[in-house]
Structure formats: structure tokens, C-alpha cells
Image (spheres, helix red, strand yellow):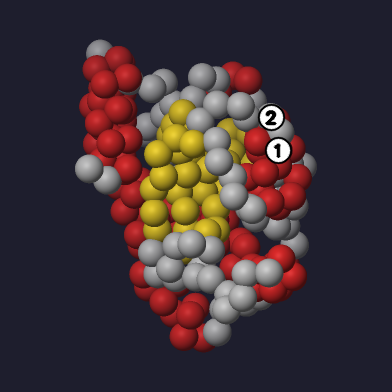
Amino acid sequence: MSALNKFIQDIYKTNPQRLFFLSLGNPGSQYNNTRHNAGHEALSYILNQCGDTDIVFSNKNLIVQRHRDLPIYFGRSLTYMNTSVKAFDAIPSALAPFTLVVVHDDLDTPLGEVKFKMPSVQTGAHGGLTSLQTRIKYPYMRMKVGIGEPVRREKGHVAKYVLSKYSPAEKELFLSKTLPKAYETVEKIEPAMRKWNKANSS
């Protein structure tokens, strides 16, 4: 069973009050279209496909929008990747409890692919996840947005790679394959949340 299908089954069983998708990236126009901002691009695409959403919270570290008719929230970090914990800390306490899904770029996932990872506290070398780990001590879900991997894995080469922009061919693949797959994840989750929401609002 895939991690996503297992997660959906768990939703039916545990009836979470809310889902909270938190995308990680870097602020500023100079980081637009860089690989490290793949999580932000995925979240923006999801929001566009979901249709009308309401902004329910905004400050210097985080902006939060709500799904049009389901208790699904989408937060975009406005901090730098290595200080992502500031965005998590900014989530309004009124939204708790929630099931967290962190949306982030991933070197180990091929460009054009999106993988859903079951709850874990492992961060690897990802700066944003490492920052979150300073506050989050419990396992959480991840939507891993593939950006491919550099030829060499030394730290300096990785840093340069994730801050680089896509070639035209890579960007086309990202737009045509990666982003739709990110939205498909939310599409598959929606029916489970809809069933739970209907049962608890009647």
C-alpha cells in the first residue's frame, strides 16, 4: 500500500479535525523558479486548482488560506528556508489540533514526480526540515516535490543546485508533470475529509 493510500485510510479511521499543508521555500523574487522553492510552487498550483480560498491568517512569517468547504488549510512560509520554524510557530493556536503535511523540494525524488512520505522525524540534510525539527518532536507527513539530484552530492554543489533555476526543458516537465501530481494528492484526500466533515456537521 502506498504512503498516500495509507494516510487516506488513517483519515477515515481517526477523523482528524483539520489538515494543514505547510510549504517551505525562500522569500524574494530572486528565488522565483529556483528548485528550492518547488514546495511553494506546488502549493500555489494546488490553491489555484482548488478554486476559491479564504485568507484566514497573515503575518510576516506565514500566510494561511482555507479550502473552500473543507477543514483543509494551506500555509506558505514567508521565512527563509533555514528559519522555517518561524513559520510553524506562527500557525494560529485556534487551528490546533491539526495533522501536518510539509510540502518541500526533494533531491531524492526525480523531477516530474511527487512522493508522499508517512510520518517521520527524519530530516536528512534539508535545511527547512532541520529547522522545523527544533520545534516539532512528533512524526509528520511530507509531500516531497521532486527536483532531481545534482551530479555531485558535496555540500557546496548541493547548495548551488537547489538555488539554481530550471532549464526550459526541466521547467516544462515541472509544470506539466510535477505540479499536477501535487494537486492529485489533495484530490485523493478530499473525499475522505468530505465524508468526515459531513458526518460531524450533521
Q: Is residue 39 above or below residue 170?
A: above
Are circles 1 and 2 on residues that touch, CB within 8 Å? yes
Name the foreground residue: 91 vs 144: 144
Q: Residues within 10 Å of mark 2 (few under 14, many from 20)?
A: few
Q: Give the residue displayed 41% in from the left and 21% down from the top.
A: 17
Locate residue 173 relative to residue 136 in the image: left or right.
left
* In front: label 1 or label 2: 2
Image quadrant holding the N terminus, namely top left
Q: What residue sits right under mark 1 in the picture?
A: 85
Marks 1/2: CA–CA distance = 7 Å
Residue 158 visible within the image: yes
Q: Amino acid at mark 2?
A: Arg
Q: Earlier in the sequence, mark 1 or mark 2?
A: 1
Residue 121 x %, y %: 55, 36
Q: Is residue 8 above or below residue 94?
A: below
Q: Is residue 67 above or below residue 161?
A: above
Q: Give the residue displayed 44% in from the left and 70% down from the top.
A: 111
Q: What residue sits right under mark 2 in the picture?
A: 135
Locate residue 89 relative to residue 97 in the image: left or right.
right
Q: Give the residue displayed 70% in from the left and 38% down from the top.
A: 85
Q: Residues within 10 Å of mark 1 (few under 14, many from 20)?
A: many
Image quadrant holding the C terminus, namely top left
